[in-house]
Image (cartoon, rainbow, N blue to C red):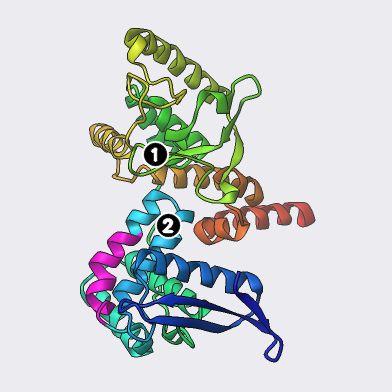
């Protein structure tokens, strides 16, 4: 491997020979890597481009080409749904605004105007921030691999997201919805979302072998991606692979659901998919997330309840946990947050009532008084 230590600069570099389009032999040398690993990663990236015939000297390559090459390598370590999200952002927002600018000529002003254009187009704060983050990540890697001296996106003000008002249901509304959806074949999915706080993909990827009804524990070990077909081992983040205890009522709902599912399995017999999924179609195939959302919205409308997203059932679960004064660490573990700060940032605004109760209890403890 042509990777060498640069003793004078206390860094690493690589040197590789290749032939350009005209058949002329050339050498590419790149210095300034802090570690041998970084130099090796950069060399491997270059070798992929040389083998595929996509390599262009960084001083000439357009950003549209560079970010496409960046994604072609990065996609090996991210989910299919994330790859689709990145492709959509590049096609619809990044390429039209920044694509024709040479990577070597990218300036902070270009990035600032890019953000302004998205804002003027009326894009949501979340979309603007996510799109900026993609550009920023790509440019950071360009610096890491020596294709840029510095990241122009690091010199502009990052887009901010104004927190939206969280929509959750009250206990009465939850009870009403569960009553109205009791006879629906997806009742178990709704019940799990409310009573465990699992994400949609986690519910749709849950297998019976991940459910221990005797111990009343379920394990999040795989998820269904947004395409409705791909079952992915693991979860959204490392912290999302977890165990979640379930209540006796949830155990009962699962048992009743399994009885109905066994009847369906017997009916479909040889054409049953046998994926061991808790929530699936009648023949055992994966249940598309979009169809679950549609069913939920239809039932919500029929029950004449305030419109919320299916994901808001997860927020509702968290709010109920907080209302019960459950420890934030426990809530973070149930939700699969790898850091408790994530839980605090998301649900911290629900804590004032807890502080009020705590103050009253302190009054009672010290003075024997409370309001």
Q: Can you say which quadrant of the picture contains the N terminus?
A: bottom right
Q: Is residue 98 magenta?
A: yes
Q: Nearer the viewer, residue 341 or 236?
A: 236
The magenta stretch spans which residues? 86-100
Residue located 58% across and 70% down the image: 40
Label 1 to label 2: alpha-carbon separation: 15 Å
Q: Secondary structure at mark 1?
A: loop
Specify whether 197 is left or right of 190.
right
Q: Is residue 170 visible?
A: no
Magenta stretch: helix, strand or loop mostly = helix
State the mark number for residue 230: 1
Q: Pinpoint residue 341: horizontal percent, then vertical percent.
A: 60, 61
Q: Pinpoint residue 363: horizontal percent, then vertical percent.
A: 72, 56
Specify whether 243 is left or right of 316.
right
Question: Residue 288, relative to residue 102: is it above or below?
Answer: above
Q: Nearer the viewer, residue 316 or 236?
A: 236
Q: Nearer the viewer, residue 244 or 31?
A: 31
Query: Pointers 1 and 2 in contact (CB under 8 A)?
Result: no
């Amino acid at each position: 491997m042509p990777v060498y230590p640069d003793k004078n600069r206390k860094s690493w570099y690589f040197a590789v020979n290749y032939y350009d389009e005209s058949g002329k032999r050339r050498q590419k040398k790149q210095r300034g890597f802090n570690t041998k690993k970084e130099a090796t990663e950069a060399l491997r990236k270059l070798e992929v481009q040389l083998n595929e015939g996509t390599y262009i000297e960084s001083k000439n390559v357009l950003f549209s080409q560079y970010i496409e090459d960046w994604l072609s390598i990065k996609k090996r370590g991210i989910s299919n749904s994330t790859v689709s999200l990145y492709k959509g952002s590049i096609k619809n927002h990044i390429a039209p605004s920044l694509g024709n600018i040479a990577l070597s000529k990218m300036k902070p002003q270009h990035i600032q105007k890019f953000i302004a254009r998205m804002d003027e187009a009326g894009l949501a704060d979340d979309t603007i921030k996510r799109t900026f983050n993609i550009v920023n990540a790509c440019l950071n890697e360009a610096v890491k691999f020596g294709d840029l001296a510095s990241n122009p996106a690091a010199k502009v003000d990052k887009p901010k997201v104004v927190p939206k008002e969280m929509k959750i249901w009250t206990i009465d509304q939850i009870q009403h919805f569960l009553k109205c959806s009791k006879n629906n074949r997806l009742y178990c999915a709704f019940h799990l979302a409310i009573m465990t706080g699992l994400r949609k993909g986690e519910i749709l990827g849950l297998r019976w072998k991940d459910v221990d009804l005797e111990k009343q524990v379920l394990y999040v070990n795989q998820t269904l991606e947004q395409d409705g077909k791909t079952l992915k081992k693991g979860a959204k983040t490392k912290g999302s692979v977890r165990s979640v205890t379930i209540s006796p009522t949830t155990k009962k709902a699962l048992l009743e659901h399994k009885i109905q599912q066994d009847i369906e399995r017997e009916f479909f017999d040889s054409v049953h998919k046998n994926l061991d999924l808790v929530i699936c179609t009648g023949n055992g195939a994966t249940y598309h997330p979009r169809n679950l959302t549609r069913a939920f919205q239809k039932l919500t409308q029929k029950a004449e309840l305030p419109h919320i997203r299916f994901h808001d059932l997860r927020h509702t679960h968290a709010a109920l946990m907080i209302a019960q004064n459950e420890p934030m660490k426990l809530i973070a573990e149930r939700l699969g947050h790898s850091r408790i700060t994530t839980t605090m940032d998301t649900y911290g605004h629900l804590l004032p009532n807890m502080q009020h109760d705590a103050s009253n209890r302190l009054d009672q403890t010290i003075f024997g008084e409370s309001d």
